[in-house]
Amino acid sequence: MKILFLTQIVPFPPDAGPKVKTYHVLRALIGQGHSVTLVSFVRPEEVSHISALEKICDSVHVVPIRRSRIADIGYMIRSYLTTRPFLIERDDLRPMQELVNKLVKEGDFQFIHADQLTMVQFAIRGASAFPDKKPKVIFDAHNAVWSIVERMQENARWFLKPVLGVEARRVKRYEGELLKTVDHVLAVTDVDRVGLQEALHFSKIKQGDRVAPITVVPIAVDTQKLQPVKRKAGSRNIVTLGTLHYPPNADGIRWFFNEVFPLIRKRVPEATLTIIGKNPPQDFLDLAAREPDAVKVTGYVPELVPYLEQSALMVVPVRAGGGMRVRILEAFAYAMPVVTTTIGLEGIHAELEKDVLVADTAEDFANRVSNLLEDISLQEKLSKNGRHLAETKYDWQVVLDAMRPIYE
């Protein structure tokens, strides 16, 4: 089959959650014998990675994109005029639509695979502009996005709550309408499948509406590439990571170092914290400057392994978000013991106390981490079982075979 694959980010290198998911889906489709033409927005720092994707795709086409707070204000105003979600208005750029229409017109694609919510609009318009072509539109939903915005609202400052409440309702209605327009939906968890179905009912189904089927295909990792690390014996370092300009990631880590880490230090005074991730907020840097002996903020690092080797465990303190946490799956693959929250573990079929530790309050989270720092046998148990789980349930060659029937 010939597939036109639309993505919001250049999916290489696979060094952040969305890129990991998209890259392995791309690899799987190509490995299953499909011909893939990739279309992506590209930021200046991503240009150098395009050549790696040109080696595996039939062709790669890009549209430059830049973010700015001033532009975002304009998109927010436009969102209130059109009643479409801000996220959709922000990415609805004419050059992308013109490129998609051109490729659909000139090509013979059986499918348009729209990766993430904001890319579906281009796929739908491109398919409907040439009804004689009749490509099917696949919506690859990384998350039920409305639920992420709603959870962000719960933890936001009072003056942001009304804004996020409006956006959550608009995204929910928009996602529901998409399910009546596209041909098939991919969700990464049963939680997201239920969330998308809730959005469908929120958008008010009418008699005669066609509803796309939803197939759950979990996020996958490459367990051949990600090998178990040899952690430093007796380490008291805690590592956490994420793309730090993504609000749910920053919110969870901020909660950890403000409310949880001080409790850990009272019990384990030698405990240290390493925060890894691109674009750390200023308060993260300020914390590291105030407590240089206890906290290190690295920014983006090209290679994680040296930092994991110096650490006893990883924390994934998620209070908002959706989909699956690739950070946890990769930690399992690296054989890193993990402590996370109930929200953080959503969609991952791990056994509590055997594969992973879970806590939701600051005090409970601190106790879990402190116990784990002091219990080497528990570290080894979680390390071994997490690795086994990654190999047997979340390796990309096992998981992504579930897409085969959709495209055949």
Image: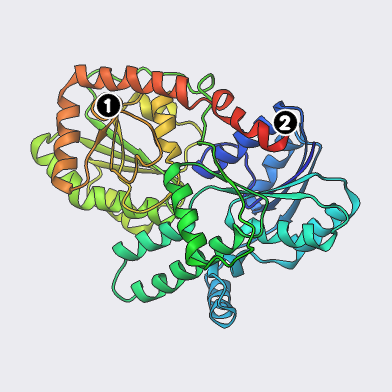
Q: Are marks 1 and 2 in contact (CB under 8 Å)?
A: no
Quadrant of the drawing holding the C terminus: top right
In the rendered structure, the answer to whether residue 53 lies left or right of residue 264 reads: right
**In x, y percent, where is residue 317?**
30, 45
**In x, y percent, where is residue 14?**
57, 36
Badge 2: how crowded within 10 Å, few (<14), some, or many (20+)? some
Q: Which of the marked residues, 1 or 2, is nearer the chain's N terminus?
A: 2
- Res 299 quadrant in image: top left
Residue drawn 82% across and 52% down?
134
**In x, y percent, where is residue 160?**
36, 73
Seen in the picture, residue 322 relative to 231 is either above or below; the reply is below
- Depth check: 3 or 200 in front? 200
Q: Is residue 234 visible?
A: yes
Residue drawn 52% across and 60% down?
200
Quadrant of the drawing holding the N terminus: top right
- Res 384 quadrant in image: top left
What's under tag 1, amino acid-wise? Ala
What's under tag 2, amino acid-wise? Ile
Chosen colour scheme: rainbow
- Res 181 quadrant in image: bottom right
Seen in the picture, residue 379 relative to 400 is either above or below; the reply is above
* Circle 1 or circle 2, nearest the eye: 2
Residue drawn 20% across and 19% down?
376
Q: Which residue is mark 2?
A: 30
Q: Point out which mark residue 312 bears.
A: 1
Badge 1: how crowded within 10 Å, few (<14), some, or many (20+)? many
In the rendered structure, the answer to whether residue 45 lies left or right of residue 145 reads: right
